[in-house]
Image (spheres, grey):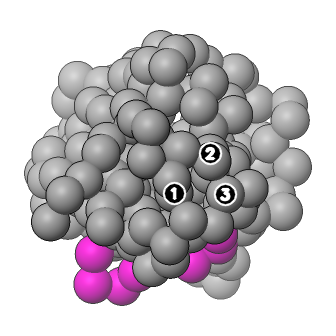
Amino acid sequence: MPRITLNLGEDSGRTATGATWRYAIGYVPGAENGGLVFEGGEPSPARLPDYDDSGWEEITDLPQRNSGGFTFCWYRTRITIPETVDGNPTGGMRVQFETCVDDYGEIWIDGECNRDRGTVQGFNTPQRTLVSQSVQPGDQHTIAILAVNGPLGAPFGTVFVRYANLGFEW
């Protein structure tokens, strides 16, 4: 299948889609203990497309790293589908989001997580999930990545997003 990839970690990919990456630490950034509770926890609102991340750190360098230890953090961006990619019209193209999170990651597209492809996929496993089966220029999508340092029983090192790509396919 012919495809074109835009790297959302580079200026050219961010410019083409209007993407600005934001980053915050915590399962629920800003909440006490990062939003981690023993019982009765709620789903993290950071996964939702209308969540206000305007106070989060804006980053231009993927991978953005944080300190080691038991850490949850979020990376979020909003993309706008361009008219063309590499001179090819985007209307009707299938678009997939591709990433690899060190160490574990979930991908949320417009507040939804594909339970087969977007959930935690093991230690540093590449992930790909559908953004849209048939995009139109100007469509907007929110991409949220929940990253967790691991292994969970004895975490070490840092947590980061190795890459973040949009794959346009026709």
In the image, residue 110 above or below residue 29: below
Q: Amino acid at mark 2?
A: Pro
Q: Position of residue 127 (x, y in %)?
A: 24, 59
Question: Residue at (69%, 21%) from the top-left corner?
Answer: 58
Spatial separation of the CA atoms under disc 3 and disc 2: 5 Å
Q: Which residues are magenta?
A: 108-117
Query: Could you tell me which residue is drawn at 49 percent across and 29 percent down?
Result: 13
Residue type pointed to by label 1: Thr
Q: Position of residue 116 (x, y in %)?
A: 27, 84
Q: Which residue is more in the foreground, 38 or 139?
A: 139
As drawn, 139 above or below 152: below
Residue nearer the viewer, 62 or 31: 62
Q: Secondary structure at mark 1?
A: loop
Q: Is residue 82 visible?
A: yes
Question: Considering the image in quadrants, where does the N terminus appear?
Answer: bottom left
Q: Are marks 1 and 3 in contact (CB under 8 Å)?
A: yes
- Which of pointers 3 and 2 lies earlier in the amino acid sequence? 2
63 or 12: nearer the eye? 12
Q: Is residue 136 left or right of residue 89?
A: right
Q: CA distance from mark 1 to mark 3?
A: 6 Å
Q: Is residue 112 magenta?
A: yes
- Give the vertical position of 93 relative to 69 (above or below): below
Is label 2 in contact with label 1 (beta carbons under 8 Å)? yes
Whether pointer 3 and pointer 2 mark residues with C-beta atoms closer than 8 Å, the reply is: yes
**Considering the image in quadrants, where does the C terminus appear?**
bottom left
Look at the picture and state if 94 lies above or below 73. Answer: below
Residue that label 3 marks = 137
> Disc 2 designates what residue?
82
Which residue does the numbered mark 1 point to in the structure image? 90
